[in-house]
Image (cartoon, grey):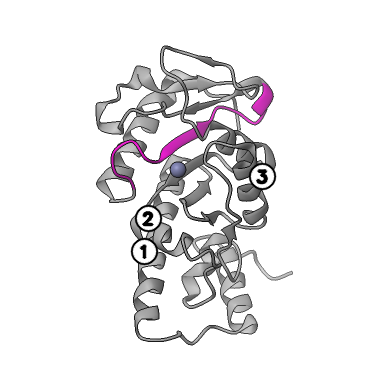
Amino acid sequence: MKPQGADALRLPLLETARAMTAAGLNVGTAGNASVRLGDELQADGLLITPSGLAAERCTVQDMVLLRADGSFDGALAPSSEWQLHRDIYAAFPEAGAILHAHAPFATALACQRGDIPPFHYMIARFGGSTIRCARYATFGTQALSDAAVAALQGRRACLLANHGMVVHGRDLDHALALAIEFETLCAQYWRTCQLGAPVLLSDEEMAEVIERFRWYGKPKPAPP
Ligand SMILES: [Zn+2]
């Protein structure tokens, strides 16, 4: 990824933050979004939504240019979860954008502190046969960031215990689509649990789905 100028990404980031609210993922000042500015996190930094200001009230200039050491440019401070964003970019080079939300169904499940099992094949979209719940830690701390990075190993999303969810994608549009899909799965899981314990897919069934997703939307290579 070529380093991108922060100014080119200010509007897409703000629009993504507003789209999270429109999609019902966020209410008020909860939740935040960021986008990576280049492969070299130390040199390029990231752009992140500000602390304590609802997306509807933000302007493009309120998006905060944040460096990996936590220093930033601008009048507003970065989101209180900036460490979570920085550490996910550092741990997962494929992460181009990150969304964090207190989405209603994901948060309800996160308060149960359980992983989401393979109740539906679309769980595989997030990289494996479960979506994990990170262990509890206070918001805005290094401990929360460490817990999320551990729960995201091999995954594009996780629940944060008694808090919400975090998702990373290759860019802002991908991350937003995944966040909406994740909340939809959480709503479906919540509903099926009302009927009793769902029948789960087996390891073999999920392995087949994961293999299919590997080629989904891509031309299959010609056989040797
Ligand atoms: Zn939060």
Q: In the image, what residue type sits under mark 1?
A: Thr
In percent of width and height, residue 118 lies at: 53, 76
Q: In the image, what residue type sits under mark 2?
A: Ile
* Quarter placement of the N terminus: top right
User: Residue sitting at 41 percent across and 57 percent down?
Assistant: 107
Q: Which residue is mark 2?
A: 180
Q: Is residue 34 above or below residue 174?
A: above
Q: In the image, what residue type sits under mark 3?
A: Asp
Q: Is label 1 in a helix, a strand or a loop? A: helix
Q: Dividing the image into four equal quarters, which quarter contains ligand 1?
A: top left
Residue 56 placement: quadrant = top left
Q: Which residues are magenta?
A: 26-42
Residue 62 placement: quadrant = top left
On whether ligand 1 comes within 8 Å of the CB at mark 1, the answer is no
User: Residue sitting at 61 percent across and 42 percent down?
Assistant: 145
In percent of width and height, residue 69 lies at: 65, 21
Q: Is label 3 in a helix, a strand or a loop? A: helix
Q: Which residue is mark 3?
A: 146
Indicate which disc, 1 or 3, sits on the residue closer to the N terminus: 3
Q: CA distance from mark 2 to mark 1?
A: 6 Å
Q: Which residue is mark 1?
A: 184
In percent of width and height, residue 163 lies at: 46, 51
Is residue 75 at least partly visible in the picture? yes
In percent of width and height, residue 36 lies at: 55, 32
Disc 1 versus disc 3: nearer the observer: 3
